[in-house]
Amino acid sequence: MAGRVAGKVVLLTGGAMGLGKAATKALMAEGATVIITDIDEAAGRATAAELGCDYLHQDVTDWARWQAIIAEVEASHGRLDVLVNNAAITVFGSIADISPEDFKRCYTVDVDSIFMGCKAAIPLMAKSGGGSIINFSSAAGNKPSPDLAAYNSAKAAVVTLTKSIALYCAREKNGVRVNSVQPGTILTPNVESVIAGTPDPDATRAAFSIAQPIGRMGEVEDIAHLVVYLASDESKFATGAPFIVDGGLSIA
Ligand SMILES: NC(=O)c1ccc[n+]([C@@H]2O[C@H](COP(=O)([O-])OP(=O)(O)OC[C@H]3O[C@@H](n4cnc5c(N)ncnc54)[C@H](O)[C@@H]3O)[C@@H](O)[C@H]2O)c1
């Protein structure tokens, strides 16, 4: 099947690598025009050149930049059909270890950015009859660990923020659907480097794999396929929902 998102204009944050890059590839293969943004300019431009999409420089925590980017997308493409709020950071630490500054930094990048992205994009999406917003949460939002106080709670906040925005859009009848995605551990370059940085990478890799009842980590395509579904009109009755694709991690 090809062309599942043909003609759609997609803005995707944090597209330089990992899940954002894989989702961009999958969306383009199904006919979308994708504009990626990233805070890492060199990696963002390299990915855009490799995949043949556009790149805009963005720190997703900057409200003025969000407004400028949405204005730029309107000027260059005349519409916005899909926003993928993918960019995030993982901040490690227990309640004892983490500083108030690092806790706040995690929320600013992982939650405030999604608030700002939705706030900036919804009016433009509504102008052309609606669209689909896909907010990246995590299975870590369902399954807390003692050493991930900020990330666990930030990713849980994304799920409820998404529901509130989805209900607002439904009440406004503006045609915008808003869903969240909750991946399990996916073997991205970021996860690879976390594994490599542990004292016993083989043991960490095994532990990451068996944490998921299915017995392995996910592949980036496992999530890219979900993004294509949510971006497409196939998901036109889905809104406010957390889509869990995690090898069973959340229920174990
Ligand atoms: N990889 C996993 O196992 C996993 C599991 C569950 C959820 N997730 C979520 O999926 C999303 C993507 O994960 P990933 O592993 O591909 O991450 P990643 O770290 O590989 O990529 C995230 C991208 O976001 C960019 N970024 C970071 N801060 C930014 C900022 N302030 N402004 C703009 N861009 C910024 C980074 O430069 C990077 O290119 C994240 O929301 C993450 O929390 C990942």
Image: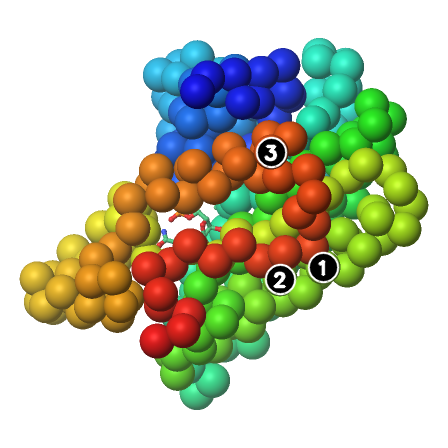
> CB atoms at circles 1 and 2 under 8 Å apart?
yes
Residue 93: give x, y in percent of width and height.
40, 76
Please tell me how many numbered marks the rendered image carries.
Answer: 3
- Disc number at residue 159? 2
Determine whether 101 is above or below 50 in the image.
Answer: below
- Which residue type carries mark 1? Lys
* Lower position in the chain sequence, tag 2 or tag 3: 2
Image-based side of 74 in relation to 214, left or right: right
Q: Nearer the viewer, mark 1 or mark 3?
A: 3
CA gap, disc 2 to disc 3?
21 Å
- Disc number at residue 105? none
Residue 201 visible within the image: yes
Residue holding disc 3: 234
> Residue at the right extreme?
172
Task: Please tell me how crowded label 2 is: few (under 14), some (14-19), or many (20+) other residues with Cα within 10 Å.
Answer: many
- Assign the C terminus to one quadrant of the image: bottom left
Residue holding disc 1: 163
Q: Nearer the viewer, mark 2 or mark 3?
A: 3
> CB atoms at circles 2 and 3 under 8 Å apart?
no
CA gap, disc 1 to disc 2?
6 Å
- Residue at disc 2, CB closer than 8 Å to ligand 1: no
Image-based side of 152 in relation to 18, left or right: right
From the viewer's side, name the closer residue of 185 and 58: 185
Residue 31: give x, y in percent of width and height.
52, 15
Determine whether 247 is above or below 27 in the image.
Answer: below
Q: Secondary structure at mark 3?
A: helix
* Quadrant position of residue 129: top right
